[in-house]
Amino acid sequence: MDISNSVGKSNVLSKRGLRIMNDSSILEIGMLKCQTNGYSDANPSGVINAGTAENTISNDIIAEKLSQVKSPYLDDPDILKYKDFTGITTFKNTLCSFLTKYANAHEQLNPDNLVILNGCGSCIAALTIVLCDPGDAWLIPTPYYNAINTDSNRLPLVNLVHVDLTSQESQETGQPFQLTVDKLEDALDQATVKGINIRGLFIMNPHNPLGDIYSKQLMKECLQFAKRHKLHVIMDEIYMLSMFDEETKFTSVLSLDDLPDPDMTHFIWGFSKDFSMSGLRCGAIYSWNKQVVAALGGVAYWFAVPTAMQFTLDRMLSDEEWVGQTYLPTNRKRLRDSYDVMSKGLTKLGIPHLVRSAGLYIWADFREFVSPLTFEAELEMFYELIDAGVYIPAGQCFYCQEPGWFRIIFALPNHIQQLVLQRIDKVISKRRKFNLRCPVGDGENK
């Protein structure tokens, strides 16, 4: 990869440093608006953050539990010393037991295959570093969570080759944005013709931002595709327990007893979403490949989780009754109730959206209000929404190939959701008033 293609010059920074400094996204712009002029009781006209995928509706349960955890500093001075940078033994054992149970793993997970790092972003970066060379690429379906690009490219210098999904409804499922192996094959062929070295496939399940939950059959087909082409697979299941429809079945890659190629399959999960702990930075990689685990151990020094935090999370997870009987069912109910509020509110406003049962967000169709239907006009609406006091990222932040889609976080207190809906209504009402409509397809809004 040529890292010299930077904006401007610097007598201070390296070319790499200059490229990193200039590497920003609309997501970061939106977050900065919320940080510098964010909504609060003291600043009610500030910008509401309905764009960052954080579960704020269950923070109180977590905070109460952590306040009850005895500080490890008080009874273990050994905590102040260096430990295994891939994770302390007790926490690895506890986390393996937890994942075995809640991912319905087909066998007890082996702590020797587990690497604990400071967040799933670090997990992606570390795996990319040990599996790819600079200039290599991952295949990834679009739209996808923007930060995966940062995790793979900013330091590892590895690219993402898009498998573009569209809003055209699938003949098989009747749903938009559907992933198929044929689309993977086409994207791989096109990359090969261009001389791009594809090292693996990146899949999110449940998906961000679509909220899709991949079937067992589709997952196996994707894994078989990867095996045919000797590709690694990173299976990101960070929203594994953020499902709010008890009738919807989720199949973790850990539950499969017939993985096509275990040595090339790697699982990621973290506490950020399912346990409302995005600020505490703890994620994990489970890999069946001993060489990969050993290589991850070589980079874990830069991504290690503080020992005190591991002890605290270990003690939290060790309270199995609290996890299974208090936190998870309460969080699931709160997510379901919050989703219903946002979904019904968007329907009342006349905004179509995907009806899903996982994640913290809704993928919403604003194409009627984006005129002309271009990414430039979509960006104008993004800024207009911010001016109206609400930050929701535009589809181009997620590399959606069709303008007019936005992701809205619903895991917010009810009164905040109502304000979000009111501020969205203010923008779209203005656009309706001035007839800024853009026909979709045959002229009818889906």
Image (cartoon, helix red, strand yellow):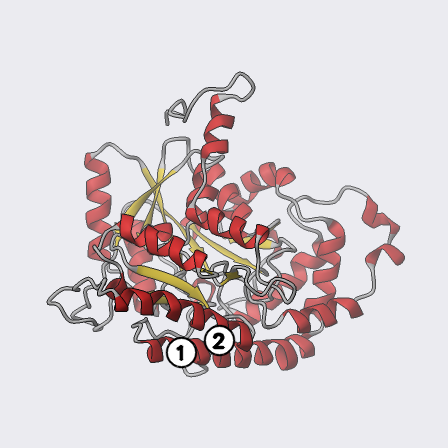
**Residue 12: % across, % down:** 56, 19
CB under 8 Å between callouts 2 and 1? yes
Q: Is residue 75 visible?
A: no
- Quadrant where the N terminus sits is top left
Residue type at mark 2: give it.
Gln
Q: What element carries label 2?
A: helix
Which residue in the rendered view is the most extreme toward the left?
442
Quadrant for residue 270, please give it.
bottom right
Q: Residue at x 62, y 54 (%)?
A: 282
- Left or right, residue 144 beside residue 118: left
Which residue in the rendered view is the most extreme toward the top?
11
- Left or right, residue 294 beside residue 376: right
**Residue 124: % across, % down:** 49, 47
Q: Residue at x 34, y 51 (%)?
A: 379
Which residue is the site of mark 2?
418
Give the mark nearest the N terminus, 2 or 1.
Answer: 1
Crowd rating for badge 2 (residues with CA inside 10 Å; few <14, some 14–19, many 20+): some
Which residue is the site of mark 1?
345
